[in-house]
Image (cartoon, rainbow, N blue to C red):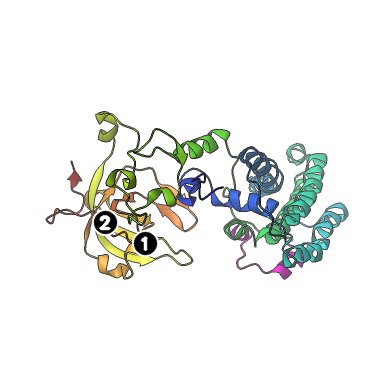
Amino acid sequence: MSKSKGTFVNARTYLDHLPAAALRYYYACKLSGTTDDMDLNLTDFVTRVNSDMVGKITNLASRGAQMLNKPALGGTLGSLDEEGRKLVELAQSRAEAIAAHYEARRFSQVPVEVAKIADAANEYFDRREPWKTIKTDVETTRVTLTAILNVFRILAIYLKPILPAYAEKAATLFGEKDWTWSDAAKTLEGQSIGKYEYLATRIDAKQVEAMVEAAKVKPASSGEVAHESRASKNKGGSRSGATAAETAVPLKPEIAFPDFEKLDLRVGTVLSCETVPKSSKLLKFELDAGALGKRTIFSGIRGAYPDPAALVGKEVVFVANLAPRKMSVGVSEGMILFAGEPGEPGVSGGVLSPFAPAGAGTPCT
């Protein structure tokens, strides 16, 4: 990362291609209590996330919960046998050491500790072969899965400071919420769990390549390619003597008319608009889209509207055929068009609206 050279990727570009939890996990793997620079190696990033976060840790929940929810087991935990209890106690015994790493800001040691426990749990799972015993001995299988899921629960609690949204989803699986550190000392037996919802998925190297490519911009004044940066998007003409050509935002790659025809732009009437807790950028819109029904859309334009309630009753233009996007705060069912860059100093703008009332659901051509 070099701000002066413009060789970095904006957070928004990253989030357009990859999940936040993956980067949070990788940063934790690299951060220590020192002020040394951190090397963000994208190849290592993919390997570490896929191998440890997904392949070792999340795999416990994925395999364990999905198998426990099969009709034969009914989604109910059993009791721990001696071997399973020892495995759970091993995980619980590392609580003090892991807490000490957090306190000393040795964050990189937390994933190391967690991965070691996950290795032991996966070895236990593979040795007990529940995918075989479920056909011959349901209760033995239940005992195995009870140990595995208890260990995963403990690991998710240990990772909560790094992966809060991940931990929240994991807590929901067990019918719990608002985990505290002391909850790792508890053991769950004989209770039902919820349906498994994906917590993390493997990263394809092509996703990273697409992100890096999207981060490249071509300045209008030269043929050189640089990675996007705020410095290269000088909107206010703060650099003395800057010309319009030098400060203009570069065009994106040219598209053909059929590409544009794929967009279905509609008018929506804002039924409600409110801020999203714990987000400095998002607004939650409820739109009346006419015959299309109601739409919930999350839009990162909070910086432009200190009083979002003022948008209620306003007609806005939105992309109606954009695939729904699952976010940590809910599912966004479209994209509201906005002129400008909200939150950027000296930049004004606003949502795009018809010049005259058009009616909810009206197509835009």
Q: Which mark is residue 171?
A: none
* 174 in the magenta segment: yes
Residue highlighted by disc 1: 345
Q: Are marks 1 and 2 in contact (CB under 8 Å)?
A: no
Work out whether residue 199 can be spotted.
no
Q: Return the residue nearer the eye: 225 or 362.
A: 225
Residue 282 sits in quarter: bottom left
Horizontal side, residue 219 vs residue 270: left or right:
right
Q: Residues within 10 Å of mark 2 (few under 14, many from 20)?
A: some
Of all residues, the one furthest to the left in this rendering is 356
Quadrant position of the C terminus in the picture: top left
Is 150 within the magenta?
no
Task: Identify the residue at image location x=61%, y=62%.
Answer: 175
Q: In this view, does 101 lie above or below 13?
A: below
The amino acid marked with disc number 2 is Val
Q: In the image, 341: left or right of 77?
A: left
State which region is magenta: 171-188
Please state which of the two labelled residues, at mark 1 or mark 2, is closer to the viewer: 1
Locate residue 280, reporting x and y percent. Answer: 44, 64
Count of numbered circles in the view: 2
Mark 1 to mark 2: distance in Å?
Answer: 18 Å
Q: Quadrant of residue 132?
A: top right
Looking at the picture, tell me which residue is in the foreground, 304 or 348. 348
Disc 2 is placed on an element classified as strand
Q: In this view, does 2 lie to the left or right of 88?
A: left
Q: Residue 58 or 49: which is nearer the viewer?
A: 49
Q: Is residue 275 visible?
A: yes
Q: Residues within 10 Å of mark 1 (few under 14, many from 20)?
A: few
Amino acid type assigned to the residue bearing label 1 in the image: Pro
**Disc 1 or 2, which lies upstream in sequence?**
1
Name the residue rendered at 41%, 48% in the picture: 232
Give the labeled residue for mark 2: 351
